[in-house]
Image (cartoon, grey):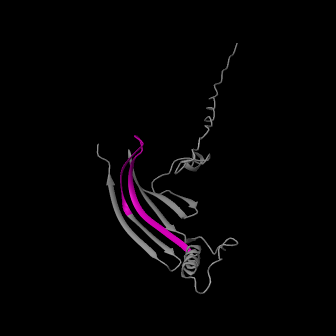
Amino acid sequence: MTASASVKAAEPPPPALRKVEIRQDAQQVEVLPTQIFEMMVLPDGDLPEGGRVAVKTPLGEVASTVEALKPPVATVHLEMAGNQVSMGAQTAPAGEDEGADEGDEEGQAQMQAAQGMANASSKMDFDARYDFDVGGGKLLSIAGRSRADMSMGGMANVKTDTKFSLKRIK
């Protein structure tokens, strides 16, 4: 006589949808995309020392390289060379250019502001290294540099260059 058995893990039920009530006087509404957890999925398998994974995003390719793996800590190099992201030329809706006559300074200023925003662009890149406790699932430290360049179509430019260093305190 022979016997066999199998066990199959049950899929957890999907989260229940909640109705969001919006009041007339609400200044903001917090909404998360339904795909939020899909956006957090990690690549399958293990990443060995020297291994690299890259993910394309609208802002640029984000790459992670395992520089050292000394159990239980992994040192990972995280970098992104950002794409130039621009809003592109947009046309004003019908009727919005009315009142922008030669002698109307306010209308002219509004048109220039709209044109400047239509040509707005930004670029961001970063280079950081972090230590991660693989066994404990904790970020131990991160240090690096982030640069951003935002342009408002010639009206204003904002450039930031930030160096940062964070360390977990037990």
Q: Residue furthest top?
A: 1
141 or 154, which is in the foreground?
A: 154
In the image, residue 159 lies at what x, y percent? 42, 73
44 or 39, which is in the foreground?
A: 39
Residue 71 visible in the current orientation: no
Judge left or right: residue 15 versus residue 160: right
| Stretch of the chain drawn in magenta | 120-144
Judge left or right: residue 131 versus residue 10: left
Is 72 situated above or below 9?
below
Q: Quadrant of the C terminus?
A: top left
Q: Is-magenta flag for residue 136?
A: yes
Q: Which quarter of the figure has residue 66?
A: bottom left
Q: Secondary structure of the magenta portion, mostly?
A: strand
Judge left or right: residue 96 versus residue 27: right
In the image, residue 83 lies at what x, y percent? 55, 70
Q: Is-magenta flag for residue 81?
A: no
68 or 23, which is in the foreground?
A: 23
Q: Quadrant of the N terminus?
A: top right
Residue 55 visible in the current orientation: yes
Question: So how many labels did they put on this image?
Answer: 0
Q: Measuring 47% from the left and 58% from the top, which residue is drawn there?
A: 65
108 or 159, which is in the foreground?
A: 108
Is 21 situated above or below 59?
above
Q: Measuring 58% from the left and 86% from the top, which residue is drawn there?
A: 103
Q: Residue furthest bottom?
A: 102
Is 146 situated above or below 108?
above
In the image, residue 50 lies at what x, y percent? 46, 58
Q: Residue furthest left?
A: 170
